[in-house]
Image (cartoon, helix red, strand yellow):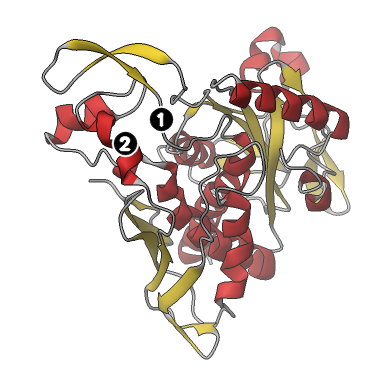
Amino acid sequence: MANTFGQLFRITTWGESHGGGVGVVVDGCPPKLKLTEADIQPDLDRRRPGQSKIVTPRKESDTVQILSGTFEGQTLGTPISMWVKNEDIRPEAYSEMATKFRPSHADYTYIAKYGIRNWQGGGRTSARETIGRVAAGAIAKKILRERFGVEVLSYVKQVQRIEAEVDYQTVKVKDIESNIVRCPDAKAADKMIRLIEKMRKAGDSVGGIVEGVARNVPAGWGEPVFDRLEADLAKAMLSLPASKGFDIGSGFDSILLTGTQHNDLFRMKGGKVRTLTNRSGGIQGGISNGESIYFRVAFKPVATVMHEQDTVDSQYRNTTLKGRGRHDPCVLPRAVPMVEAMTALVLVDHALRQKAQCG
């Protein structure tokens, strides 16, 4: 099973939704980085369930423990293992799912592949797997910030048809964290919250878009062919639960422009090569060009809805199933730290690869 991500900065996540806990092993972290649980916990708090009225009510503290890889508050250069205990487990809420495949979940595909599955909350397919990613991403963000001056952030850009107006070049973390939906446009955020609450009360769900940004990325990170920086970002984002689409820079809207209109023209500014526009999204030829990297990730509506729907059981007979358990009516507010984590993991890996190859 492909549970490992990255080349020089590698992470391996482990654990199931209603098992004893979930976690991650980080290999390749440089030594002498100051690191304690206090550096990890804030991002896990942003990801955890039960944090507001528009997310799943499952109550988990998601308290992280660093089990290895540090000594006297610094990294050793050895594998860093981190663990979060599952506290509010209720596997009995999923007993009917033991013999029935939930529509649009991975229940049937896991059986098709492995012939066995953990049906308690989805097991390995649950979004609780992302705890390991977010914990590892917090380390990656710290390295990027302290050793390379790179800032990584993301925010909710759109919920269904409600789109926010946000300047990716100037948006601040305090504005993103100023409301429970994590949208820095206050007017749009109010509308988004009302829509998500409406969906929750109706037993339904809704999707949208998270926009990711990396600022102050130096020119030269990335690879020119198979490991293009945008290709690795795309793989990272599409590996997240409920993600269905990725575009970067001008993205799909680029088809509406001519080459003359779309080109990012070069000019010298402050002794550096800069572009007058940034339709490339900070990456050209698979390599960062020194401009801000920005992209969008589309997340589908949550698959579990509290309505009876057609499905098939484990004996391959037609039946019906009504959603049960505790679920997000919209993944977007909690997906924000996940997008940041995966962005940071891609960038720190390429930063180390650039240093290894080119000095």
Q: Circle 2 sits on which residue?
A: 94
Q: Quadrant of residue 105?
A: top left
- Picture layout, residue 290 above or below residue 187: below
- Disc 2 residue type (three-letter): Tyr
- Picture layout, residue 220 above or below residue 236: below
- Disc 1 residue type (three-letter): Arg
Q: Is residue 137 left or right of residue 20?
A: right
Instruction: Between residue 327 and residue 212, name the one nearer to us.
Output: 327
- Circle 2 packing at 10 Å, graded few (<14), some (14-19), many (20+), is some
Question: Considering only order in the chain, which callout, 2 or 1, is on the residue closer to the N terminus?
Answer: 2
Q: Is residue 19 left or right of residue 80?
A: left
Residue 134 in picture, x, y percent from top left: 52, 55
Residue 118 in picture, x, y percent from top left: 23, 42
**Disc 2 element:** helix
Q: Give the spatial CA distance, label 1 vs label 2.
A: 7 Å
Residue 22 makes an appearance in the image: yes
Residue 272 in picture, x, y percent from top left: 80, 51
Residue 177 in picture, x, y percent from top left: 76, 48
Q: Quadrant of residue 107?
A: top left
- Circle 1 packing at 10 Å, graded few (<14), some (14-19), many (20+), is some
Q: Circle 1 sits on which residue?
A: 324
Mark linked to residue 159: none
Label pair 1/2, CB-CB below 8 angstroms: yes
Q: Is residue 52 left or right of residue 139?
A: right
**Disc 1 element:** loop
